[in-house]
Image: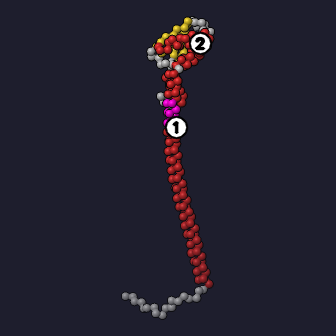
Amino acid sequence: MNARPFLFDTDFRPRPSSAATVQEDLSLAAAVAEAHARGMQEGRAQAEAQAQARMADALTRMGLAAAGLLGQSDARDAERDAEAMDFAVALARRLAGEALDAQPLAAIGDAARAALQHLRGVPHLVVRVHESLVDEVETLVKRLARERGFEGRLVVLGEPDLAPGDARMEWADGGVVRDRARIEAAVLDALGIPT
């Protein structure tokens, strides 16, 4: 066995340093200080990068939430616009229907005026209207024909399937149809509203 004696005589106190030892101690202290400064700088940079990443994430979540809210708002606006358009169409139909029901001759008279402007020299004109309006329409169209200089034969026929205010005017090479349902459908189509 290898036994070692206790080192009672050994002096463990620091010895006075030589210039080389002092230089080594200073180099070591400078290296430690530099490493500490570099570690602090890297730590700050890492903390700043994490803070920026959290901020970017928060901004992204806020942007998505805002986009969702804007989408919901746009959907509500579109729904309100559609409801307003439906109401306006229903009101216009009601008002127009009441006006046509109250004065069906006005619409027929307008259509007759437009047709008679172009019917010089035509031998005859047949006007088809609702059967309840034959006498009134005949009086109206004869007066308009005289005013417009139409000299052909005029025939007014009653049709039970025509709505009051609707009319079909036919002559040898043409005709005019005044159909309230088709007019409404065309207006709704022009507005982009399904019928």
When asked about the image quadrant of residue 29, the answer is bottom right
Within 10 angstroms of label 1, few (less than 14), some, or many (20 or more) residues?
Answer: few
Q: Amino acid at mark 1?
A: Asp
Looking at the picture, tell me which residue is in the foreground, 4 or 87: 87
Q: Which residues are magenta?
A: 80-91
Could you tell me if residue 170 is visible in this image? Answer: no
| Magenta portion: prevailing SS class | helix
At x 53%, y 27%, the residue is 187
Looking at the picture, tell me which residue is in the foreground, 40 or 175: 175
At x 56%, y 69%, the residue is 40
At x 49%, y 18%, the residue is 164
Residue at disc 1, secondary structure = helix
| Residue identifier under label 2 | 144
Q: Is residue 88 magenta?
A: yes
Single out the residue that lies furthest toward the bottom.
9
The percent position of residue 166, horizontal first and vertical second, equals 50, 18
- Residue 81: image tag: 1
Q: Which corner quadrant holds the N terminus?
A: bottom left
Looking at the picture, tell me which residue is in the foreground, 184 or 159: 159
